[in-house]
Amino acid sequence: MQQEFASRLLEGAVTELSRLPGIGRKTALRLALHLLRSDQATATALGEAIINMRRGVTYCRECHNISETELCPLCADSRRDHHTVCVVETVKDVMSFENTGQYSGLYHVLGGIISPMDGIGPEQLEIDSLVERVTTGDIDEVILALSATMEGETTNFYIYRRLAPYTDLKITQLARGVSVGNEIEYTDEITLGRSLLNRTLFSDSIRR
């Protein structure tokens, strides 16, 4: 049953809020009503913060992590190991690995994983740019750090095949501290850190 609103402006706010992931119309209404009860400065500050974020945040030309400049702070940091690249699915995974304090290399954000069911193929991900980084850069190791799901493993194998011609390149993957079926986003930092430190050659998993 369609809910009736006394205000079109309230209805518009609820509609836009409900577009956010995990937010249904009931939750969106509760949030909108909370903002109405708050002082105007609070709602204005929230709106301006969202607009400023959308206008000011872009993606790093090198690793595709979020950035306010052409090159993100991680890629621009000379203290990090520029010979090692950790391949992750999303920007949130970068944050998860950084929180472990166990990794000092660079990242490469794919922007998703191969999922035929969702209509996502390799050409829609940042895989070509990863190959280009390996081709033109001074990279010694690529760590495949995708979720241990069927889609994640499929993407890992596809990337491995694309990078296989570069025989001097070491291709590794997370140790199985990350359980099969688990997503990086929901793995605790200690387990994630240990899985990173104890990473294994990807080719060893193929031979099993």
Image (spheres, rainbow, N blue to C red):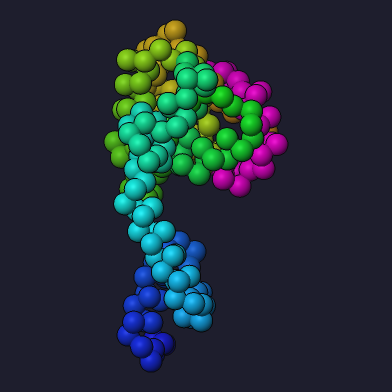
Q: Is residue 82 above or below residue 28?
A: above
Work out which quarter of the rendered image holds the C terminus and state it.
top right
Residue at the image position 39 percent from the left and 59 percent from the top: 50
Task: Out of 208 and 50, give the one closest to the viewer.
Answer: 50
Q: Main secondary structure of the magenta part?
A: helix
Give yes or no for residue 57 being in the magenta stretch.
Answer: no
Give yes or no for residue 200 being in the magenta stretch.
Answer: yes
Q: Would residue 120 be found to the left or right of residue 170 on screen? A: left
Task: Out of 179 and 6, give the one closest to the viewer.
Answer: 6
Residue at the image position 57 percent from the left and 40 percent from the top: 96
Whether residue 52 is visible? yes
Residue 128 x %, y %: 31, 28
The answer to which image quadrant residue 197 occupies is top right
Task: Out of 193 and 7, give the one closest to the viewer.
Answer: 7
Residue found farthest to the front: 41
Residue found farthest to the top: 168
Whether residue 181 is visible? no
Q: Is residue 104 above or below residue 33?
A: above
Residue at the image position 38 percent from the left and 62 percent from the top: 48
Which portion, as a residue range, is magenta?
182-208
